[in-house]
Image (cartoon, coloured by chain):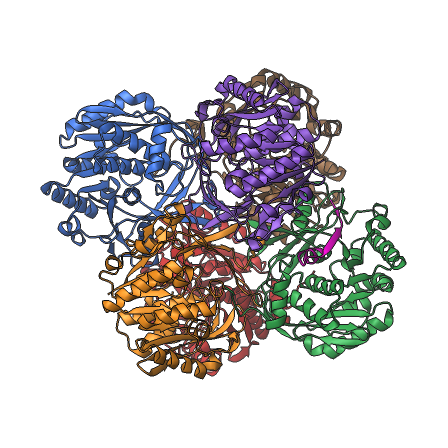
Chain colours: A purple, B blue, C brown, D orange, E green, F red
Amino acid sequence: MKVLTFGEMMLRLKPLGNNRIIQSDVLEATYGGAEANVAVSLALLGNDAAYLTKLPGNLLGETALSALRKYGVDTSKILRGGSRLGIYFFEKGASVRSSNVVYDRAGSAFAEAARNEFQWEELLKGVDYFYFSGITPAISAELEQVVTDACIYCKAHNIPVVCDMNYRGKMWKPEKAQMVMSKLMNYVSICIANDEDFEATLGIKAFDGDMSRGIEQKDSFKAGMLAVAEKYPGCKTVASVLRNIHSVEESQWMGLLLKDGEFYETTRYNLHVMEGVAAGDAFGAGLMHGLLHGFGAQENIDFAIAASVLKLTVSGDLNLVQESEIRSVMKKGGGASMSR
Amino acid sequence: MKVLTFGEMMLRLKPLGNNRIIQSDVLEATYGGAEANVAVSLALLGNDAAYLTKLPGNLLGETALSALRKYGVDTSKILRGGSRLGIYFFEKGASVRSSNVVYDRAGSAFAEAARNEFQWEELLKGVDYFYFSGITPAISAELEQVVTDACIYCKAHNIPVVCDMNYRGKMWKPEKAQMVMSKLMNYVSICIANDEDFEATLGIKAFDGDMSRGIEQKDSFKAGMLAVAEKYPGCKTVASVLRNIHSVEESQWMGLLLKDGEFYETTRYNLHVMEGVAAGDAFGAGLMHGLLHGFGAQENIDFAIAASVLKLTVSGDLNLVQESEIRSVMKKGGGASMSR
Amino acid sequence: MKVLTFGEMMLRLKPLGNNRIIQSDVLEATYGGAEANVAVSLALLGNDAAYLTKLPGNLLGETALSALRKYGVDTSKILRGGSRLGIYFFEKGASVRSSNVVYDRAGSAFAEAARNEFQWEELLKGVDYFYFSGITPAISAELEQVVTDACIYCKAHNIPVVCDMNYRGKMWKPEKAQMVMSKLMNYVSICIANDEDFEATLGIKAFDGDMSRGIEQKDSFKAGMLAVAEKYPGCKTVASVLRNIHSVEESQWMGLLLKDGEFYETTRYNLHVMEGVAAGDAFGAGLMHGLLHGFGAQENIDFAIAASVLKLTVSGDLNLVQESEIRSVMKKGGGASMSR
Amino acid sequence: MKVLTFGEMMLRLKPLGNNRIIQSDVLEATYGGAEANVAVSLALLGNDAAYLTKLPGNLLGETALSALRKYGVDTSKILRGGSRLGIYFFEKGASVRSSNVVYDRAGSAFAEAARNEFQWEELLKGVDYFYFSGITPAISAELEQVVTDACIYCKAHNIPVVCDMNYRGKMWKPEKAQMVMSKLMNYVSICIANDEDFEATLGIKAFDGDMSRGIEQKDSFKAGMLAVAEKYPGCKTVASVLRNIHSVEESQWMGLLLKDGEFYETTRYNLHVMEGVAAGDAFGAGLMHGLLHGFGAQENIDFAIAASVLKLTVSGDLNLVQESEIRSVMKKGGGASMSR
Amino acid sequence: MKVLTFGEMMLRLKPLGNNRIIQSDVLEATYGGAEANVAVSLALLGNDAAYLTKLPGNLLGETALSALRKYGVDTSKILRGGSRLGIYFFEKGASVRSSNVVYDRAGSAFAEAARNEFQWEELLKGVDYFYFSGITPAISAELEQVVTDACIYCKAHNIPVVCDMNYRGKMWKPEKAQMVMSKLMNYVSICIANDEDFEATLGIKAFDGDMSRGIEQKDSFKAGMLAVAEKYPGCKTVASVLRNIHSVEESQWMGLLLKDGEFYETTRYNLHVMEGVAAGDAFGAGLMHGLLHGFGAQENIDFAIAASVLKLTVSGDLNLVQESEIRSVMKKGGGASMSR
Amino acid sequence: MKVLTFGEMMLRLKPLGNNRIIQSDVLEATYGGAEANVAVSLALLGNDAAYLTKLPGNLLGETALSALRKYGVDTSKILRGGSRLGIYFFEKGASVRSSNVVYDRAGSAFAEAARNEFQWEELLKGVDYFYFSGITPAISAELEQVVTDACIYCKAHNIPVVCDMNYRGKMWKPEKAQMVMSKLMNYVSICIANDEDFEATLGIKAFDGDMSRGIEQKDSFKAGMLAVAEKYPGCKTVASVLRNIHSVEESQWMGLLLKDGEFYETTRYNLHVMEGVAAGDAFGAGLMHGLLHGFGAQENIDFAIAASVLKLTVSGDLNLVQESEIRSVMKKGGGASMSR
């Protein structure tokens, strides 16, 4: 079973620890991006995962590529060329100081990629699942069209399309997002929607915006998920992460899955968060892994949320954990023991 | 509106993370000092802030100066000369292990500065507020006299004097502190007193010394603040931070302001502390910022405490935050969201 | 009063912070091992502490030796020769991700040491206490014999033997451990047993394996400790640490001492753990320190647990704290104040 | 005497030491740019130096600004706004491996600045010298026009214009460069041209392109410099650095000055280069310093080349040296002694 | 064209810069080994390069594997299992202090691999060149047999065998080396022999052991190379690097190739060495690259030596350079220019 | 044979690599001082070396002490108490930029030590050699007296006194140095004098001050050494290092020994210097080691200079090398080979 994920990969520059950029002489340089993160997770879990993007032909593009190869992702489909690698600067917050992202992604090789560079017939040959997130069509009108092309091809060839809504308020406004995503949702079989995604990208009210009490709004989330399945009949699976976030470090997380009309809930995790980035991608990858291996619905969402909360303990965009560790969290809630 | 702060700046040497000095091959080198920290905060918030101290003519003095300039402080009044830059070593504790300060400040250029080097008429030209802390007169008898000179000049020229009591038990004993500060308080318009400051420097019993239940003693603090205003009729504003400190990381903080006979209280923050140094200076600067911009009393203390708790998330003596971040903490309590 | 501790010292290699090995270009290199850690603690507390092991004649052996000397341990008895220094890789976990140890200790100079290299008459000359842990006999059959030789010598010469059970599931199985340790226990005067040690090494059921509720099982622990004293009449002192571990960072700890038929309990500490390694060795050293200085039973266990929880705030295997810091934790519970 | 320098400031990202980007988890983050470097040098030498550029309103722009302020540059004229801060990646080579620059400067706030943002009458008020390099007009047609505006204003108000040719082959081709620069040279009083600058930007053949024997071509350089002075009669001063570069580390440097028809040569320095970036800017600043202080021609070029070779020993774009150090190199050739 | 290289991969632990182990709290952790280095070089140059070894099933084995994957090596043939990953500690010397290697490779998964784990028929399917070095048979008698098996298979199937003698005095003595290698040489088509290799592994006197004048002994090297070709008629190509090493940093290098009876010499490079490890592997890979692409003999040896001297500028075992950089060194001798 | 060395130990703070203090966020923290360095070298070479100083009772004093213990120095005689540990800041230069030392040693525990704290009868019990440098009496009048007391005691008890002149122009002027040292020289048996020491501390003209041609002045040095022996008849051994220093990195070094009227010269080393600090102390220790082990005069000076030039390859004040490495340099000149 082969998965192809499609999106933008960026250089991430982050001060050490919780430092601020203005006090930093060195920046950690890692590479990631929603769909790349999913591909890496899947590869680390032993799956055949390919990633599609466009990377510049310079040293930065080469280094981004090597970061994927390191973890076993199939990079053979990646396009090369164009001008620059997108960048995002990331200040990890602490306590009451929120984390901070400064995008520097305009003009990237991917953002400027043209529709005719993507030969979907060839790119999707042998692919069993196609995965993208709402970030990709938000990048450019051309990429919106490219994603649409891919979705049409997938539908015609019975390749299930998985989409993580991933609303980014710094990239587009709700009206635009809804207009674009409501079209694309017609091709989506499995949909991941969190928090503000419901309203901002799907126009469905499910969450009141108070991050400190997402779990308390479970019923509202369920209603929202049902609304998604109703509005887009091809989308029989909707998954979501519910969170109570009290500060940068302290939060509770749980997963919710709607599959073929039934809801499945996970246990609720109390977490001390090391880094709150890309946990949604880890969730998506965990969900995909279950789909690829035929997990039952309950195991599937349990696995996905355990993968997701483990990401909160790993620095960088990539969820560098093994299946045994995810299983251990599923079983024991994790963290208490040390084998030696 | 121009503020002049006056005190000693030091090199701070700190092991990485929570390491101890005995296991450290490298030390972080940053620069700070109570009044310098206030000046930097004010400059970062867009105010016209000048800082007065004496720095040695060597590379260390130059570097300390450049650290102030970097953040926009007016350093034109700083005296140069003398022998050395004071140093303090700082071990950040963890959990039940307290943080640890080793002073190495004797014989510094500032500590050995002479009264006649400070021409207050010129130094205070165009200054709207004069700020110092109880550390400055604790350094030397000469500096006690210098501060007195400044206060007299300010009184004569209607420049309000702001004083943070800042009692330092390693620098002087309560008897001495009280003797000196009770004289200086006659010139002070706005006074900041925390925890042990009340008793040690003002001889007023307000806090029983149990850092784990400062907030529970709010009434006692209020009584103490009223006593200050009564004893020193020129001091119509008294501000204080109340804290319940459970460990190096866990604490609750709130602010209290007495202004013209009325009390103003802030919300209470639950904090995961990254570094517990210089939050008092951040509070003082927040208070000053409100004074400079004519904030109402409630907004003033809300702003000050939000600035103060943000400092607990920033490494180094300086409160490297922007006004928008302080406002965000005031509004939401902070930490939960990440804009991207 | 002189203590001799006996065991293996290893190079510990650990990624920075909570990083994983696969993402690490640099590893922290420190040196430790259960009995070496005890010796360092004792030396730092001002005791005459000697350590016995065998270190290779190469640069790694020399560096391990220098790490002990740095903290004042008497290294004059250490044997040199053999092939390599044992290594362990340590990934510090976070939140729900457990910490992880990868042993690479096979074939070490100590593991291959021969019985006739240890001349106990000479090695134990002037020694007042002999300390080893269950790790040492687990390393090789030869070392099991060597430890037995030492115990026999100690018994014959009235040198009290202290043993920390220290069960390591990656080194031997319960059956083997019980077989070996039950023989050695006949020579032991003071025994430290935690958690799984009771069952795995002594065959006594005292703890149900749920690390999140050790303290709740206090009565069961007490029964286990009494069973130890009953089974091994020479062992009049049994000490234990009880823990509720909720995640890598959050736990509660308390100490329990059985001495001459009486139980002594400590207060219960709420901890934010920086590094959960070698706290048991710190506990053992704290206990020994009390024995060497004739502390009463209550003070002895209070001191031991305070030393142990302080270790949770120090990076590396060694408990780099001073007696005054242990006393401060005993008195105030620690962490709240900063003297300056 | 006030100098205004005008150009682009960038974030520079560089692997540690001589590492390559593909093997780097961290990058040094510093800030610089030809004209910013000149302003910093001048400020560090005690001059009144202002810098003009446009920086984005985000954290990166703020940090770039603070880097200038740190060293005393007047940043009050800097425009804020626009999208991003330009970046350049820098791999320091070693031995036979050349250093490597990857530009990522397209779309920067400065590159997209508009002509009408620059009110030269106000910007040049009180300015005694205007400094720019050939990089600035190479960035955009708009900036070419902006520089022309400035030059016209300067000529009309007798403000001498200093220009460092600074040809950048990755930014424009010789034909374009010559077309633009030949117009601008009509306004230039003092011109710095090195190596390929002569031919690429001025169309004058002076150097055969062999970097290993620049000094051997001194006569040809002199002819080129005379040709410049002849072609642009307003340009009475032409300065140049001659180099024999044998490898990344080993080179010889000397300076050459043509002033009012006379040539002045410096001694020849044998250098072990630590970092070969921005030495030309240090030379320009050294030359400017002499102009500002009325040095004689020989002292002027001696000072400039000493400043320049000192830059080869400092990491980062900025020449962090003091006048006394430049003087020491002028006197002794430097490096041999250590005062203590 | 596919190459398979076969040998041991190790974790390399090195203090930062030129530090010594005894003063190092952190060690750089990289991964390499003669034949792995060759595979990485070939992959980076765009070739289809597979690597065969056995790696343990633990985190260290996984990390070693990911290091190969990162640079595009085909790792699909690598065996997993066994106990540990071999390690070598490396102190980089300076000036008159020699670099220092401490092996800790005994008992590694590869060293303990058994003959029947290597199914050469499958492993060599589709392979066009087989590459190993003298280190592999030096590891164990079993591996000597395994290499022999591979060579026999290659001979039978016309797969050319390339062997770098790579004598390691810490692994075996000349008598043993000669006994083993003289048998294996009967299968070798292309042989690389440097310095002491001639005498220690082939019993041919070509070099007098004085590393400071290897180039001066060119005639003697040539005689030795001819002797090799004569003694082993199947070996028609012999390549060698000649060096004058004056100190850790300063040396001259040149290459020598004997092909079908003709000698080809390269230019002589003056080098400032950053790290003197694995330049021989870079040479071997450069040679292989030429063979794979049908370079003429002169271009082949020119390319190989340029690749080799570039390795002296890169930290770590892997020669992280691109073909364009090798070409640039071949053309210009390198180092002098910086393109920007 | 036991040696006691006597002097001041300091914390040394140094930017990473060749960075400047003004650009440094972290400083390397190591510990050293002329006589401490000698003691460490002697201990590392296997000698019984004790060190006498006074260290403050704080964490810094404790850490300095542990640095000595780490390398096996007998620290039992060290006095504790007083205020602070002296500090020196060290900027390592590069090429033409000289290295730079900023002293911050005033008011140190040692500088303020009183005569009556030093009970020489007890301190010198069992000591076979007493070693101090000219730095010690330069610190204070009290210490001048203390050194005199020690010398008188040594003379009375036939303990040879070794003195390294070690002139420090930042600590005293030649007149003062000569006045003090000429008295002390009457007690000295073995004297080390380098470069400016001859004139500044002994009033003997031997070196013209040009560090780039010290070796060329060998005859003049010899005359100076003879003059020393003549002036101070008790001083039968005079040793000196001659240097041609061309830049921070490049120099030539050789040793010269006058013993009982005969001169002994070493070979001349060409060096690439990593750090030019404390090579004189390494020389002194090398000389002492020969005395302790009865080396012949030629071997003695050969060993001393080899130890000294090795120090130029080690970072920090301490010469962390082994006897075998010194022997290797003596034999081969070093640096060319790597054993593996």
- Residue D50: where, in percent of width, then height? 29, 59
In the image, the segment drawn in magenta is E39-55
Q: Quadrant of residue C15?
A: top right
Quadrant containing the C terminus of chain C in the rendered view = top left
Is C295 placed above or below F126 here? above
Residue located 24% across and 68% down the image? D156
Q: Quadrant of residue F293?
A: bottom right
- Residue C224: where, in percent of width, then height? 64, 19
| Relative depth, front residue between A187 and B169 | A187
Quadrant containing the N terminus of chain C in the rendered view = top right
| Relative depth, front residue between B133 and B315 | B315
- Residue B195: where, in percent of width, then height? 30, 29
**Is residue C285 visible to us here?**
no
Q: How many marks?
A: 0
Is A62 placed above or below A218 here? below
Is B49 placed above or below E222 here? above
| Relative depth, front residue between B274 and F147 | B274
Residue located 62% across and 20% down the image? C225
Residue B83 inside the magenta-drawn segment: no
E18 sits left or right of B18 in the view: right
Residue located 35% across and 40% down the image? B321
D9 sits left or right of E40 in the view: left
Residue E42 inside the magenta-drawn segment: yes
| Relative depth, front residue between B164 and A71 | A71
**Is residue B163 visible to us here?**
yes
Is F235 placed above or below D72 here? below
Residue positioned most to the right: E156
- Residue C256: where, in percent of width, then height? 55, 22
